[in-house]
Amino acid sequence: MTNQDLQTAQPKEPASNVKKSKASIWNWRIDGDELNKQIAGYDTLSPFESKRKRSALLLVLSAALGIVLNLWLHLYDPTGVYIEIAIFLILAAFIWKGSRVALIIAMIGWTIEKGFQLVGVFTAGTPSGFQGYIAIVWWAWYMSEFVVAYQVENARRAHK
């Protein structure tokens, strides 16, 4: 290759301009650029940009929905619902502060809860595929946030 060829050759497209795969509840990985952004802006990113803060907010959302649905519909024993709400809020506080253990507990607890919900749907007299589908999508949405937040916490810990 001549010197002129080198000057006219097009440089490779920078990684930041490469088309990225779209976000999905089924994609539980974080790319390098986003990971660096999460670590660099760990304390400054808004609650809707920060993976850990968004994970905490999802648990607060679930707690709020649990309160509203139980007050209006009286579907479950209130004691169990309020214990679950307290657990969600405690986990949310620890996740907001960056606890990896809280993220693991949230992932396990969320999986167990949605598993019981699916069992309940299919053992009811008239199982509804729609309710099962909603439980799976709800589970996948939260788990995608929890897993990515956990990846950020692990990378942040490795950078210390």
Image: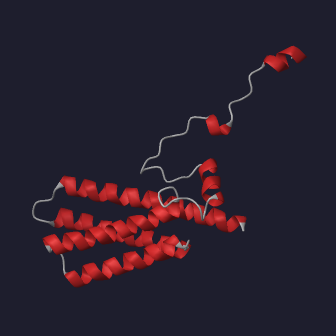
Q: In this view, does 5 lie above or below 114?
A: above
Along the line of sight, the residue nearer the viewer: 147 or 121: 147
> Which quadrant of the rendered structure holds the C terminus?
bottom right
Based on the displayed image, in which of its 4 quarters is residue 132 positioned?
bottom left
Asked if residue 35 lies left or right of residue 108, the reply is right
> Which quadrant of the rendered structure holds the N terminus?
top right
Asked if residue 88 lies left or right of residue 157, the reply is left
Along the line of sight, the residue nearer the viewer: 57 or 130: 57
Q: Which residue is drawn at 34% across and 66% down?
A: 61
Based on the displayed image, in which of its 4 quarters is residue 128 positioned?
bottom left
The image shows residue 81 at horizontal and vertical percentages of: 26, 78
Q: Which colour scheme is used?
A: secondary structure
Asked if residue 126 lies left or right of residue 153, the reply is left
The image shows residue 150 at horizontal and vertical percentages of: 54, 64
Q: Is residue 76 above or below residue 6?
A: below
Residue lying farthest to the right in this orientation: 3
Residue lying farthest to the left in this orientation: 125
Q: Residue at x 74, y 22 (%)?
A: 10
The image shows residue 101 at horizontal and vertical percentages of: 53, 75
Is residue 47 among the parts visible in the rendering?
Answer: yes
The image shows residue 16 at horizontal and vertical percentages of: 64, 39
Q: How many marks?
A: 0
Q: Which residue is drawn at 54% across and 73% down?
A: 97
Based on the displayed image, in which of its 4 quarters is residue 111 positioned?
bottom left
Along the line of sight, the residue nearer the viewer: 155 or 55: 55
Is residue 2 among the parts visible in the rendering?
Answer: no
Q: Residue at x 25, y 67 (%)?
A: 117
Asked if residue 141 lies left or right of residue 78, the reply is right
